[in-house]
Image (cartoon, helix red, strand yellow):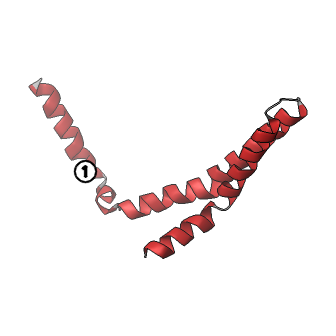
Amino acid sequence: MLKKQLITYAAIGATLILLPQLGYCDVEGTLNSIQDTLVGKLMPLFGTLGICWAAFSFFMGNPNAKTHLFLAITGAIIGFGSSSIISYVQSVVN
């Protein structure tokens, strides 16, 4: 057990010595990167896929197709407008 702990601490120490850039990372930059990925890429993608799935459901004659279309359009509005929504919330908070 002591040997495993010693190896773990040595690996952590070697990592910190060899990669000092890890000490300069910030949480805000990471969160902004995640936000940009979600808002810029994933939300519009999921909105588009939802509308495609709802249209497929409608063309196949699903009895719940109108509900699917309504929910897909609502999701797409939120997905494509998410950057504006986030900017508005940030301006209200600040």
Q: Position of residue 71 (x, y in %)?
A: 71, 45
Q: Quadrant of residue 53?
A: top right
Residue at 25 percent across and 51 percent down: it is: 16
Q: Residues within 10 Å of mark 1 (few under 14, many from 20)?
A: few
Quarter in which the N terminus is drawn:
top left
Looking at the image, is 92 positioned above or below residue 52?
below
Residue receiving disc 1: 16
Q: Position of residue 62 (x, y in %)?
A: 83, 29
Residue closest to the eye, 21 or 69 = 69
Residue at 12 percent across and 26 percent down: it is: 3
Q: How many circles with numbers are drawn on the protein?
A: 1
Q: Quadrant of residue 86?
A: bottom right
Residue at 71 percent across and 52 percent down: it is: 74
Q: Secondary structure at mark 1?
A: helix
Looking at the image, is 79 positioned above or below residue 70?
below
87 lies left or right of 68: left
Looking at the image, is 32 positioned above or below residue 47?
below
Residue at 20 percent across and 46 percent down: it is: 13
The kind of residue tagged 1 is Leu
